[in-house]
Amino acid sequence: MDSKANQVYVTRSGLPLRVALDWPFHRSHSGADFHVLHGAVSLENSDAGAHALVALQLTVTVREVLPSLEPDDAEAPAINTVRKAVDRKELEFLKTPKRVPVPFNSRAYDFKRNRWAFGEASDEERAALLLRKVFWETKRGASRVYLCDLADAQYLDTTPEHLMVVARGLPELRVSGEYAEASPELMARGNEMEEQARMAREELEKKHAFERG
């Protein structure tokens, strides 16, 4: 598993995720014309053992826009495809070995603008995600948090440079270079952050419970 497993990727609804991808991509064994990348997604705010095992299915159409299938080129959109699936409530976090297929297809790419597309975001939404990211990683023990992650910028429809502009305008963060430290004021909002994550998980679980009948 890769080093990204130690980072927190926050969904737009406020769920803190850890995503571990088992590189490399490999050709589908089913005979279908796509590449597959296995991974595991777990919730930072969950009991031990709750996870979602995934199989990203990269279509030929999207494969053609990637320079390569190496992590440098494919990791950020792969992580964001998983994160988007959680935002869409397509994944359920259970204690099960069942692996769920996740389409990595043209839904994640804007061919007209030749760029990845995981949804528009306002600066207010970017600020909220940055604060949650810094909170959760600080809670895990990080002394400072990297703010220029390409996956976060891509997911929020912006650039790492603009994320820094947003971060510098947040009084709850102490920004130095490309990193931030959480202020005591941010950590004092822990109950709020955890309640947002709890409610997001509850909504996700309600959706899957309804589908099961």
Image: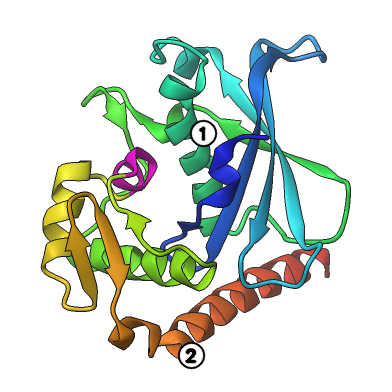
Residue 36: where, in percent of width, then height? 68, 22
Residue 50 or 139: which is nearer the viewer? 139
Residue 201 or 51: which is nearer the viewer? 51
Q: Residue 152 in magenta?
A: yes
Residue 132 found in image quarter: bottom left
Mark 1 crowd level (few <14, some 14–19, many ≥20, 10 Å Cα): many
Does 201 sit above or below residue 166? below
- Which residue lies at the image location 53% right of the left edge and 64% below the top edge? 16
User: What segment carries the magenta color?
Assistant: 149-155
Q: Is residue 156 visible?
A: yes
Amino acid carrying label 1: it is Ala
Q: Residue 39 in magenta?
A: no
The mark found on residue 191 in the picture is: 2
Residue 23 found in image quarter: top right
Of the residues under marks 2 and 1, which one precedes in the sequence?
A: 1
Residue 159: where, in percent of width, then height? 20, 41
Residue 82: where, in percent of width, then height? 56, 44
Amino acid carrying label 2: it is Asn
Q: Quadrant of the N terminus?
A: top right
Does 200 sit above or below residue 123? below
Q: Name the residue under label 1.
A: 78
Name the main secondary structure of what is drawn in magenta.
helix
Q: How is the image coloured?
A: rainbow
